[in-house]
Image (cartoon, helix red, strand yellow):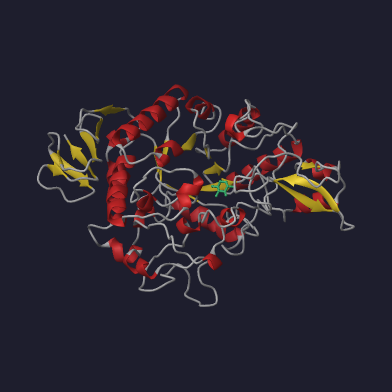
Amino acid sequence: MYELGIDAIWFNPWYPSPMADGGYDVTDYRDIDPLFGTLEEAEELIAEANRLGIRVIIDIVPNHCSDKHAWFRAALAAKPGSTERERFWFRPGRGANGEDPPNEWRSFFGGSAWTRTTNPDGSPGDWYLHLFASGQPDLNWSNLEVRREHEDVLRFWFDRGVAGARIDSATLLFKDAALPDFDPEHALVPHPYIDRDELHELYREWRAIADSYPGSRILVGEIWLPDRDRFARYLRPDELHTAFDFEFLACPWEAARLRAVIDATLAAHDPVGASPTWVLSNHDVTRDVTRYGRAETGLGSEEETCSIRTVDLMRGTRRARAAALLTQALPGAVCIYQGEELGLSEVEDLPENVLQDPVFFRSGGTNPGRDGCRVPLPWEGDAPPFGFSDGNASAPPWLPQPASWRNFTAAFQVSDPRSMLTLYRKALHIRRQERAFGDGPIRWLSAPANVLAFSRGDKLICVVNLSEESVELPPHHGVLLASELLDGDLLPADAAVWLRT
Ligand code: NOJ
């Protein structure tokens, strides 16, 4: 009934986890957290999805595990210098009594990247490195056991029929063993823990594993690197297949800047023969409807991203609809974050006592964190939990859904021709039907100020009006899909259209 028309589903980490960071703190890479089900159920799901032609992509989290993982527990129980501790980054502290962290590195979530351990006799011990929350100790990728373990985990899931892996924090993993301090304003080259060259040999090994399986198994990198050439190195033919294009996601709603980002992305992918993967949102950023409804439409610093600002949701929704048509007209893959297809906005008024994201806690509450984009989906019905769970009051969804979502459920939208869900379903359907939307090039067409127009093949044109005024459409034979009602041959502001020429 709610068929969307997708080819694959990427699951965020579904492994057993204390959920110190939404499951990105894994205690067992070969099992499923009881919150979500069992390993047998996951196997059934993968098999059923495969039967339906939907591929399953899992999330691999190699940079760190949970502090409750058997390896980390063993490391805590073992002595400094032991093989158990070699799998992580343990170091004595600085200062007369080791009371200062081994270096000044900061966690991406705020605060120091080091936490001090306690010895079995209760005295303070060595420190361990965690680039994220303290419940996520970083693994030592120079350690062969760490490498072999993750190769085995990849095989474990490929053996179960998964079609690919999204690699979390794919540019971190390796560290400079000297753990040098650096000025974040003038980062060291090479950086002591971002984008180190050793990663490429690792991903070549992983690619060989993926290629050793029948059918196509793909590796998708989570790669936030502003340097396009460094980014593209990960997508060489014997490394990862693709990576999310965060420059596109972060780009403000301005025609010239979007065009520049699209051109730069295509130019970076071209020499390595890889396909881009376009994204408008994900579980780490403010939802696109909200972002595009703000005065500052780009993704700023995390602090800015998360602070509550004035938002015009009507405008944000129009732009998000137009952005969906723009994104889906581009060559490459498109990844839709759950709820994007329902036009959900960021839930910005979650009470503090329900927040879960370590970003909120580690920033001392100055950054609301990412819970606002992670509120469970509304499927049907007039009241929470909107069919997401069975409505059992003792087990409500882990974040409360706004009552206003009764007008955003999949059931509410599915037969409404003007809904976001209908737009996504139609767009995905047409994108699949029209060969011109495949991997071929795009050709920019001349267009008025703050309007994007490009053709795909010789029969399709996409026009996106980011200006404040209606603009005249180029000559065409028919309209395949429009994000807003057209006024004759005029495309309204903040709208997009796919035309047949
Ligand atoms: C990136 C993931 O997308 C994010 O949700 C997570 O917090 C960090 N990596 C750490 O695993």
Residue 234's place in the image compared with 378, above or below, is: above
Q: Residue furthest right?
A: 121
- Residue 407 visible in the snapshot: yes
Q: How many marks?
A: 0
- Relative to the observer, which residue lies in front, 92 or 453? 92
Quarter assignment of residue 1: bottom left
Q: Position of residue 352 (x, y in %)?
A: 53, 65
Write the residue at 43% across / 60% down.
348
Write the residue at 76% across / 40% down.
102
Write the residue at 58% across / 63% down.
37
Quarter assignment of residue 408: bottom left
Q: Is residue 243 left or right of residue 267?
A: right
Residue 227's place in the image compared with 306, above or below, is: above
Quarter assignment of residue 113: top right
Q: Position of residue 195 (x, y in %)?
A: 60, 31
Q: Is residue 55 left or right of residue 93?
A: left
Q: Residue furthest front?
A: 96
